Amino acid sequence: MKERFESIVTITLISLYLIFLAGSFVRMTGSGMGCPDWPKCFGYYIPPTSEKQITWQPNKHYKKGMIIIKDKVLFVAEKEVKTTSVFNKSNWNRYTKHEYATFNKFHTWTEYINRLITVVSGFIFLFLLVGSLKFRKENKLIPIISFCAFFLMLVEAVLGKMVVDSNLKPTMITIHMVIGLLIIGLILRLLFIVKEKKRVYKYHSLFNKLLIVSLVFSLIQIALGTQVRQFIDEQVKLFGFDNKEYSLMNPSFKFYFHRSFTIAIILVNVSMFYLNLIYQLGYRLINWVLILLFFETISGILMYYAEFPFGTQAVHLLSGALLFGLQFYLWQQSRRT
């Protein structure tokens, strides 16, 4: 397993970014409440495919925990129920965690696939943890980092439930994302340890300092972005998901700062690209950093000026997460050895 551990770490990292991609698609399509409960979906392990399955019907058998919609209200079966021609409230408990009582097959399955990817990733993290124990004698840092990452994945699972129970409370979504970035940092640290422990990169003081600044700037930008996203989520709740033209109506100062701060980020990273070029430092990742910055900037411009074209939110969020990861890995390469 030692020989394949680098591959396991790489697969773990890919699974993390797949979660970010799936999560961004969920938010882009407004599918976050496609499943009103967690970890099941309307009380099913495999989600329903039609509204008829979750609409109360006479002379039908329901298992304990199944959720139905009756008169635009969610009810949960408190025990196994065989319905009669009349709805008997004594067999059902009203679902009180939130009042979202809508079924949309596309939203339901989009959210379910998002959860499925997370579950698969969880097993990959468990495999990573088991594999890391092989290194406990020669490098204790490897199993420690693996355990921390696995523990945070469990925290993310709990937060996922809290996000659903809170009816997509923006603050909970923000915390969910920040911990996701922390896990990315841990896995990238692990990848660097097992992959590049023998490689030596050229050290350039100014390049390294600018890289630290760019990493801090990216974290600030992501934090600001989550605040802007919270504002958009509130607008969506107020005006409806289909009225995207109102998503950024009368934004706060945070939005304008978030937009203008992009200029500073671009200048810092272009300066790093220039230093890498003229001093032949050999940091290839800086090229990808600029490419991601381009996608991040263009998607942001399109969201504001073209009223959120399809796919731009996913590109914006995923580009930001990838950018953070590349800069963090590049920082590890550029440190004085």
Image: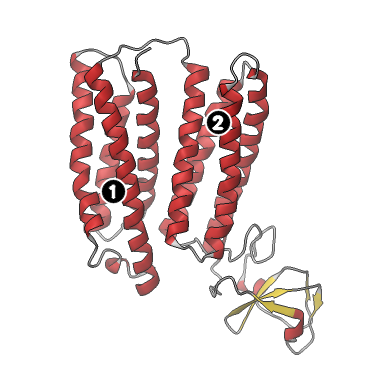
Residue 299 tag number: 1
Task: Tell how many labels.
Answer: 2
Q: Residue at x 25, y 39 (%)?
A: 294
Q: Residue at x 69, y 58 (%)?
A: 45
Residue 11 tag number: 2
Circle 2: element type: helix
Picture quadrant of residue 240: bottom left
Q: Does residue 120 lie above or below 142 as drawn?
A: below
Percent position (x, y) of residue 143? 61, 26
Q: Does residue 164 lie above or below 120 as drawn?
A: below
- Which of marks 2 and 1 precedes in the sequence? 2
Q: Does residue 306 lie above or below 329 as drawn?
A: below
Quadrant, the C terminus: top left
Percent position (x, y) of residue 21? 46, 46
Task: Assess disc 1: are there few (<14), some (14-19) or many (≥20) residues with their C-alpha within 10 Å of its C-alpha.
Answer: many
Q: Is residue 127 left or right of residue 26?
A: right
